[in-house]
Image: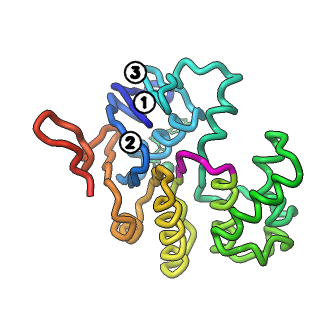
Amino acid sequence: MIQFFQVTKYFDRYAALRDVTLRVDKGECVLLTGPSGAGKTTLLKLIFGAEVPDEGQILVQNRNIARLRASDVPYLRRTMGFVLQDFKLLPQKTVFENVALPLIIQGTAGLEVRRKVSEALKAVGLDHKRGSQAAGVSAGEQQRVCIARAIVNSPIILLADEPTGNLDTNLTMEIIELFKAIHARGTTVMLATHNRQVVEEMKGRIIRLHSGRVLSDQGVYSETNSLSCP
Ligand SMILES: Nc1ncnc2c1ncn2[C@@H]1O[C@H](COP(=O)(O)OP(=O)(O)OP(=O)(O)O)[C@@H](O)[C@H]1O
Ligand SMILES: [Mg+2]
């Protein structure tokens, strides 16, 4: 599903990721953790095609994304959803319009848009807020709108960068349950977080990054050990 081979990414002369090799299989739930500046966001952006590696190779669904043509990026992104910490919703638009946006960009037909948006909003428990202005709903609801927007295309991979960063403990728990449900439906989930509650409750494979390197990985493959992930 996702493979990194000795991937290095520089910003100026600073290596944000150094010699990272890892493999994530279909249906896994991976928690990327590590201190600020460890390279978590950079790793997710590389998978999403928002950054390109300077060294090494990245395969996402067997496509070498380092060599992807610009015209192939939209296709790659259709198979992925990305949830960010800061909501990046269009505040003046309704909840429905925000979730519909990726479908509209792709030129999806109106009836299909309504069906898919309803399904995504139901999955996050917000169908009743479809007509509300995005800026008007609560912080937890805004984050759920972002998750609905990220899953509206039924992505194979869901990437999330500190998705509970601005939320209190109760709302964090709600979002954790939502990610668990999405994972239970077969979606591969990769979630970057500092939050111990998220790491403990999600019960996924933990990859720790530090200074751009993989410090530990519960899912490392070796000759004697098959996948040792919970
Ligand atoms: N666009 C950029 N330009 C310059 N440096 C960058 C850029 N993006 C990331 N970096 C640097 O790369 C390193 C890794 O950053 P990254 O955002 O991946 O860390 P992180 O683990 O996500 O941190 P945080 O937990 O604070 O979100 C940091 O030192 C950061 O300053
Ligand atoms: Mg980050």
Q: Tell me the element at label 3.
A: strand
How far is disc 2 from disc 3 in space, using C-alphas?
19 Å
Question: Mark 2 — residue?
Answer: 25
Coordinates of residue 69 in the picture (x, y in percent): 64, 19
Based on the displayed image, in which of its 4 quarters is residue 17 positioned? top left
Residue 107 against residue 139 in the figure, above or below = above
How far is disc 3 from disc 1 in space, using C-alphas?
16 Å
Answer yes or no: disc 1 within 8 Å of ligand 1: yes
Q: Relative to the observer, which residue lies in front, 172 or 123?
A: 123
**Over which residues does the magenta segment extend?**
153-159
Q: Residue at x 66, y 40 (%)?
A: 78
Coordinates of residue 226 in the picture (x, y in percent): 19, 42
> Which kind of residue does numbered mark 2 sit on?
Asp
Q: Residue at x 84, y 40 (%)?
A: 107
Q: Is residue 204 left or right of residue 168?
A: left
Coordinates of residue 149 in the picture (x, y in percent): 70, 56
> Which kind of residue does numbered mark 1 sit on?
Tyr
Mark 2 or 1, nearer chain start: 1
Q: Is residue 118 left or right of residue 176?
A: right
Mark 3 or 1, nearer chain start: 1
- In the picture, the quarter occupied by the N terminus is top left
Q: Tell me the element at label 1.
A: strand
Q: Residue at x 57, y 38 (%)?
A: 48
> Which kind of residue does numbered mark 3 sit on?
Gly
Coordinates of residue 58 in the picture (x, y in percent): 45, 27
- Badge 2 crowding class, 10 Å Cα cut-off, few under 14, some 14 to 19, many 20 or more, is few
Residue 28 against residue 220 in the figure, above or below = below
Question: Mark 3 — residue?
Answer: 56
Q: Is residue 66 left or right of residue 228?
A: right
Question: Mark 1 — residue?
Answer: 14
